[in-house]
Structure formats: structure tokens, C-alpha cells
């Protein structure tokens, strides 16, 4: 139950407010002087303070209340304070609000307005504390990952990326295939490098094959090698990627482009470690950790008969889903700054433009944009015009479209669970006002957590 501290030398004020708050499940503590109020704050958890401005008889200057407010602000900078008094010098009230007072109400107060203000401030405080706790937890998670694992200099800050990295590092030492999925340009190869760097074969080779960059008739030769004369133009024997990766890791990018014949041979290698070069009858044995990646829908390809279901399950022992850059906005500015050359920095307006862009090309697009900005910026500060971002779909327009959609019961329940029952936080996530969320909860029969 939230708690309000009432600091007023008039006992009747404390009693009236205590009765009002008790009817709305808000606890109250009362203090008759600034000294008593500060003592209570030092020993009791309080969500909000309501304080008088004058404590000495026949005093109307408000100096005592101003001094008390500034002392509370110094000791508890994030604690909301409502000023409540019959003393109504507007200029002084405005000054205190500018100094951080949450609101200023005159005696006699309006119960409904006071209660609405108190409720809003308490929920906002709860949301801010929950956010602070979450940010602290995220910072701790980042520190632990950076201390315990080799992240290959990866620049990141978003919680969505932290979840991917945490799982990647967790499974790195297990000798099982890993499938990395996600849109093009999100950094799937970097994740594969991190898995290799923290694996039991970290000292072995890291070999990359882009299955989408070669004609289908050459992919098998690239994977398994070929003896001289195995195909037109093969004048001498050549080593395949599996042999080159022996004792290390083979990263197969765009695995969905592998033809069916190559899929069958790859499945055999994954199961036995044995393969034959094209044009050879001699089996070769290798020990290779296979990491594959794709932006394709392999399940749809299985239904269409273009990807083997047994190979999918063999590759997909562990799946890492790498989100698009727009889905991890916390990474945008750190990455952008890391890509800037020549010690340049971003102007706040340029930062806003970067955050508003939808990044259909993901990290690859961001890197190219920052390379352009590094060349075109005439000063040390990069401005929006230097970015050359095209007009079109932005993250704000995407968010606006999402906000127009009516959240269903499941979406609201999930948002409330993630917010720990804090209405203000859940409403912000859903793009609704608190009142709009309350109305939907009532209509859908969703009870507010106690």
C-alpha cells in the first residue's frame, strides 16, 4: 500500500487527509513540524509528501515551507512533494514548482483534484522506481557479460541484444549446432564469431561460407571440396570448407540457399563427421562446430519441399533470434557513434533523426549512413542533413499505426504483468492513457492487481 506523509501543524488537516486517503487504500503518516517530518522521512519509506507552507502562528511568508521543501529535495531528490496552504503568492508558488514541486494546491482543497494528483504521482513514482530497478539490472547484466565473455568488441546496449548475447554465451561451450535467425544486416556473423570465441574450439579456425553468394552447382564443392576433374574447370584438387574448419567452427550464412543435394550431405556430416569430396570415393573425417544463419522462413520452405525437415531439426538444436535494429533502439546511438570517424559526434537533432528512422537495412544500413555522415559533415558535429536519410517509413509512424490498433485482452494482461501491475507503465507500453487503459480493463473484466 502506498504511503503519504502529511506535514502540517494543523491536526485537523492531517485527520481529514488521513480519512480521505484511507478510503482509497492509501496509508498516511502525520507530522506537526518540519523537524518531525524530516525525521519520519529518515526512517520510513514514503511515496509522496504533502506539506504546509507555514508552521508558526501568524506567519504567512511561506519561508518555513520553502526551507522544508528545499531540505526534502536535497535529501530525497526523487520524492514528489505537493504544497498545500492558504498562503497564495503566485510568484513564489511558480518558483517552487520550477524547483521541483509536483503541484501547488490552496486550502480549502478540492478532494477530487487532490486525490487525482496524489494517485497520478504515486503511480508515476512506482513506474520510475520500476524503471530504475530494471535499468540497474540491465547494467549489471551488461557488466557481467563483458567481464566473463569475449564479446569481440561488440557495441550494444539494448536489453533485446543482451538476451541474445546471454544465450549465445551460455551455449557457446556446448558442442551443438546453433541456428541464428533474423533479418539481413542485423549482425548474425558477429554473433557467430562471439560463439566461436567463447567455445571449446576458440583456438581453431573460423571459416565462413555464404551459401547465397555462389551458384548452386558450386556450393557442394565449396563445402566438401573436389578432386581434380570432378567438374568442368576443376584442374586440381581443392579443399572444402569443412576440411578448412577442422578443429574449429564453420559458419554457414544464408543456409536456406543450400540445394537439396547439398542439404543431404550436410546432414550426414553433422551426424557422423564424415564426407567425401566431389569426384572422390575416399571418406574424410572432421570435427567441426557448425553455426548456420538465415533470414528465410525455413518452416515455410519445409512445407514447400525446398528444405529438409530433418536437417532443420539438426541445425536448430539452439536457435538465436536476432531482432531487427528498429526492435532494439537502445543500440542505435551507441552503434552510430562507434561508426563515426574522425572524432565527430552527433548533434541531438541528428540523434532524433536516427531514432526516428525505421532502419530497413538494419546495422549494415546504419554503418553506411554514418560513413556518409563522416565524410559530409563540415564540422565536428554531425547534423541531420549530413545523414541523408530518405523520407519514408519511420519508427514513429510504425508506433502510431500500432497505437491505432485496439489492444486485446491478452496484450493488456501481458503488459500489466511486465509492468508489475503499475498502470502508468503498462499504459505507456500500450500507447494508451491511464484512463483509456482503465476503461479497457473494466470492459474486458481485467482486475487491477492489489
Image: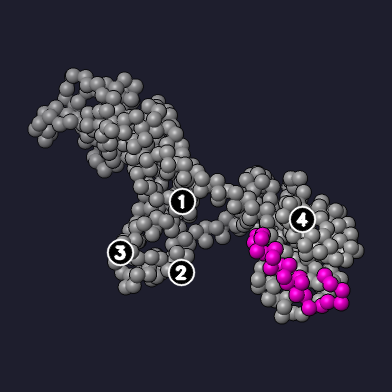
For label 3, the SS is loop
| Residue that label 1 marks | 157
Instruction: State the separation of the CA atoms marked 4 and 1.
Output: 39 Å
| Residue that label 4 marks | 40
Instruction: State the separation of the CA atoms marked 2 and 1.
Output: 21 Å
Residue 342, label in figure? 3
- The residue positioned 66% from the left and 68% from the top of the image is 100
Rendered position, 234 above or below 111 = above
Give the mark nearest the N terminus, 4 or 1: 4
| Nearest to the observer: residue 211 or residue 284 | 284
Give the mark nearest the N terminus, 3 or 4: 4
Residue 79 appears at what percent x and percent y? 68, 60
| Nearest to the observer: residue 392 or residue 39 | 39
Q: Residues within 10 Å of mark 1 (few under 14, many from 20)?
A: some
Q: Nearer the viewer, mark 2 or mark 4?
A: 4
Q: Can I make out residue 237 in this image?
A: yes
Instruction: State the separation of the CA atoms marked 3 and 4.
Output: 54 Å
Q: Residues within 10 Å of mark 4 (few under 14, many from 20)?
A: some
Q: Nearer the viewer, mark 3 or mark 4?
A: 4
- The residue positioned 76% from the left and 70% from the top of the image is 65
Give the mark nearest the N terminus, 2 or 1: 1
Amino acid at each position: 500500500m502506498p504511503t503519504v506523509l502529511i506535514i502540517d501543524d494543523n491536526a485537523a488537516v492531517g485527520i481529514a487527509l488521513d480519512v480521505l486517503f484511507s478510503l482509497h487504500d492509501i496509508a498516511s503518516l502525520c507530522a506537526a513540524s518540519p523537524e518531525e517530518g524530516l525525521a519520519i522521512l529518515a526512517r520510513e519509506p514514503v511515496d509522496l509528501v504533502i506539506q504546509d507552507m507555514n508552521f508558526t502562528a501568524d506567519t504567512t511568508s511561506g519561508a518555513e515551507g520553502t526551507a522544508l521543501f528545499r531540505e526534502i529535495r536535497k535529501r530525497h531528490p526523487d520524492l514528489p512533494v505537493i504544497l498545500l496552504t492558504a498562503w497564495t503568492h503566485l510568484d513564489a508558488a511558480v518558483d517552487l514548482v520550477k524547483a521541483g514541486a509536483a503541484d501547488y494546491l490552496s486550502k480549502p482543497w478540492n478532494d477530487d483534484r487532490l486525490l487525482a494528483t496524489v494517485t497520478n504521482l504515486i503511480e508515476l513514482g512506482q513506474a520510475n522506481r520500476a524503471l530504475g530497478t530494471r535499468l540497474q539490472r540491465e547494467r549489471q547484466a551488461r557488466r557481467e557479460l563483458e567481464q566473463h565473455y569475449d564479446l569481440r568488441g561488440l557495441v550494444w546496449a539494448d536489453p533485446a541484444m543482451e538476451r541474445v548475447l546471454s544465450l549465445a554465451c551460455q551455449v557457446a561451450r556446448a558442442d551443438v549446432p546453433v541456428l541464428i535467425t533474423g533479418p539481413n544486416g542485423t549482425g548474425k556473423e558477429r554473433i557467430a564469431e562471439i560463439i566461436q570465441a567463447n567455445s571449446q574450439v576458440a583456438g581453431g579456425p573460423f571459416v565462413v561460407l555464404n551459401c547465397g553468394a555462389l551458384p548452386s552447382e558450386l556450393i557442394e564443392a565449396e563445402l566438401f571440396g573436389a578432386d581434380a576433374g570432378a567438374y568442368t574447370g576443376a584442374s586440381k584438387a581443392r579443399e572444402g570448407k569443412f576440411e578448412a574448419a577442422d578443429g574449429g567452427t564453420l559458419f554457414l550464412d544464408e543456409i536456406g540457399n543450400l540445394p537439396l543435394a547439398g542439404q543431404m550431405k550436410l546432414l550426414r556430416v553433422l551426424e557422423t563427421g564424415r564426407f567425401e569430396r566431389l569426384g572422390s570415393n575416399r571418406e574424410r573425417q572432421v570435427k567441426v562446430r557448425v553455426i548456420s544463419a538465415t533470414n528465410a522462413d525455413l518452416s515455410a520452405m519445409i512445407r514447400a519441399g525446398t528444405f529438409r525437415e530433418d536437417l532443420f531439426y539438426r541445425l536448430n538444436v539452439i536457435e538465436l533470434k536476432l531482432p531487427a535494429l528498429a526492435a532494439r533502439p537502445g543500440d542505435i546511438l551507441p552503434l552510430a557513434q562507434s561508426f563515426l570517424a574522425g572524432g565527430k559526434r552527433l548533434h541531438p537533432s541528428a540523434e532524433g533523426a536516427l531514432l526516428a528512422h525505421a532502419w530497413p537495412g538494419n546495422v549494415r544500413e546504419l554503418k553506411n549512413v554514418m560513413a556518409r555522415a563522416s565524410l559530409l559533415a563540415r564540422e565536428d558535429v554531425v547534423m541531420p542533413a549530413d545523414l541523408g536519410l530518405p523520407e519514408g517509413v519511420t519508427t514513429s509512424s510504425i508506433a502510431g499505426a500500432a497505437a491505432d490498433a485496439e489492444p486485446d485482452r491478452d496484450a493488456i494482461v501481458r503488459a500489466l504483468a511486465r509492468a508489475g501491475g503499475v498502470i502508468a507503465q503498462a499504459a505507456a507500453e500500450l500507447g494508451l492513457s491511464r484512463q483509456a487503459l482503465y476503461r479497457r480493463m473494466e470492459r474486458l473484466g481485467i482486475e487491477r492487481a492489489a
